[in-house]
Amino acid sequence: MLRAASAAARRGISFSPGRQARSLLHSAALGYLYARLSAHLASSPSASVTEELDRWLSERRPLSEQQLVVCVRRLRKFTHNKHALQLMDWMEAHGANLHDGLHAIRLDLVSKLNGIQAAEEYFWSLPDIFRSERTYSSLLNSYAEHRMADKGLELYANMKAMNIVSNIMVYNNLMSLYLKTGQPEKITTTFWEMQENGIQPNNFSYYLLTERYLMMNDMESAEKVLKELQMVKKVPWSLYTTIANNYIKLQQFDKAELTLKKAEEVMDKSEISPWHYLLSLYASSGNLSEVNRIWKSLKAAFKKCSNRSYLVMLLALKKLDDFDSLQQIFQEWESSHERYDMRIPNVIIQAYLDKGMIDEAEAMRQRAMAEGHSGAKTFYLFVEFYLEKTKINEALEVWRDAKSMVNTHNFVPAKEVVNRFLKHFEDLKDADGMEMFCECLRKLDCLDTEAFEALVRTFVSAGRTNPSIAQWVLASYLQETHLSINSPISQLGSGKNN
C-alpha cells in the first residue's frame, strides 16, 4: 500500500489494506474516481491527472492503490498513455510499492511515449527482483512495437537461457515480433512450440496466427483457424472483424457480411469499440443499409453518443457518399454535443470541398475561426485543396489566417506542404506570389534558409532585381544566418543580378 501513512492520516485518508480498501473496489467510488479523472482530462488537452488526484486528496476522500491501478488500466485501454504514466509517476511519488507487473506496465508506457532507449534504461535501472518474466516480456513487446527484430530475438534467447519463457505473454510477444518485422512464416512454428510446452493459446495467439495467414494471402488457412477455434472456445469479435476486413479487400462482400453478423452476435454490446468497427467495415463494403442499422442499434445501446461515435458514423457516410445523411447526422451532433471536436466539422468541410461547394466550406471555416475551434487539420484541408485547384490567391488567404486557425503554440506547417508551394511559385517564376508566401512564413516565424533561397531564385529567374521584400527579409535572414552583407545571396537586396 501507499507509504507515508502519517501524512495520509493528517489528510484524513486511509491507505489501510483492510476492509475499507477492499470494499472500495466494489463500490461506486472506483468508478467515480475514474469519471472525475476523465472529465478533468477532457476539459483541456494540457490537463494532468495529478491535479485532479491532488484535489481528490484535499477533499479528504479515501484512496487505495487498487483504485489507482484500475484507473491506470482503464487509461491504457483507451490509449491515454501519457496520463496513465503520469498517474504511475504520482503513485510512486506518494510512496506506492510497485510490483513487477506494474513495472511491466510502466515500461510499456515509457516505450510508447519516450522511445525504446528510455524503455531499455528503465528496465536496466530496476532492482534484480523486478527484472522478472513480466518485465522481460514487456521489453520484448517494446522491441516488437519498434520493429527491432535483432534485439528482440537476442532478448528472447536470454530469456530461454534463464528459463523464463513459461508465460503466454512471452510467446504472444515473440509472435508479434515476427509479424511486425516481416517474418510471419515463423509464427506457426512458435505457435506449435507454445502448445508443445503445455501453454494453451489465448484469443490473441489465434489472432496472430490468423494474421500470419492473411499476410501470406492464405485465406483458406485463416478460415481453417477460425473454424477450429469455434469448436473449442468463444471466438472474440475482433477476430471476426479481422477476417471480414480481408473478405472486403478481396471484394467477397457476402462472406464479409456473414462474418460481421457473427462479430455482432458475440461482442459485448456495452463496449463501444466493436460498434465502431462494424460501422467502418460495413461502409468499406458499400453496405449503407447495414451502416444505418448499426447506427440505430448503437444509439439504442448508449444513452448518449460520444464525439468518437459521431466521427466514425460521419466518416462511414462520407465513404458511402450519402451526402444528405451526412448533413443530417452533423446537424444532430451540433445540437447535442457536450464538447466541441473539430474533427467532426472537418469531415463536413472535406465533403463540401470534394463536391466543389467552396462557399459552404469557407463559411464553416470562418465560423470555426470566429469561435476558436479550427486547427491544423482544417488549415491543411484548405491550403491543399486550393493548391490542387491552382486557386493561389485563396490559398494565400488561408496562409494569412494560419495563426488564427491554428491555436497550437509555435505552429510550424508541414515541410512537404511548404515545399509544394515553394515549388509552385518557383516553377511559374511567380515573384509576387513567392513574395506573399514568404511573408506568410515570416509571420509564422518559419521562414528558413530553404524558403529564402527559393525566393532568391524566383526573383532572379523572373528578372526582378529590387524586390520590396528584400530589405526586411534580408536583414533578418543575414542576422540569423550570420552571412556577410557581401555574400552572393545578399546581392539580391542591393539590386545586383546573380
Image (spheres, rainbow, N blue to C red):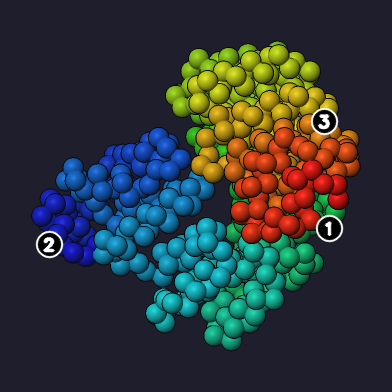
Which sits in the foreground, 96 or 352?
352
Hey, which quadrant is residue 3 in on the image? bottom left
Q: What numbered label is drawn on residue 15? A: none
* Left or right, 142 with reference to 353: left
Q: Position of residue 79 (x, y in %)?
A: 52, 48
Q: Nearer the viewer, mark 2 or mark 1?
A: 2
Q: CA distance from mark 3 to mark 1?
A: 38 Å
Q: CA distance from mark 2 to mark 3?
A: 67 Å
Q: Are marks 3 and 1 in contact (CB under 8 Å)?
A: no
Q: Position of residue 448 (x, y in %)?
A: 68, 49
- From the viewer's perspective, is residue 76 above or below residue 35? below
Q: Position of residue 434 (x, y in %)?
A: 77, 36
Q: What numbered label is drawn on residue 6? A: 2
Provide the secondary structure element on which disc 3 rests. helix
Provide the secondary structure element on which disc 2 rests. helix
Quickly name the residue at label 3: 388
Tell me if I can see residue 246 in this picture: no
Q: Nearer the viewer, mark 2 or mark 3?
A: 3
Q: What numbered label is drawn on residue 216? A: 1
Which sits in the foreground, 474 or 186?
474
Pointer 1: residues within 10 angstroms few (<14), some, or many (20+)? few
Pointer 3: residues within 10 angstroms few (<14), some, or many (20+)? few
- From the viewer's perspective, is residue 100 above or below residue 455? below
Q: Are marks 2 and 1 in contact (CB under 8 Å)?
A: no
Residue displayed at 79% across by 31% down: 432
Residue type (three-letter) at the residue carrying disc 3: Glu
Residue displayed at 83% across by 58% down: 216
Residue type (three-letter) at the residue carrying disc 2: Ser
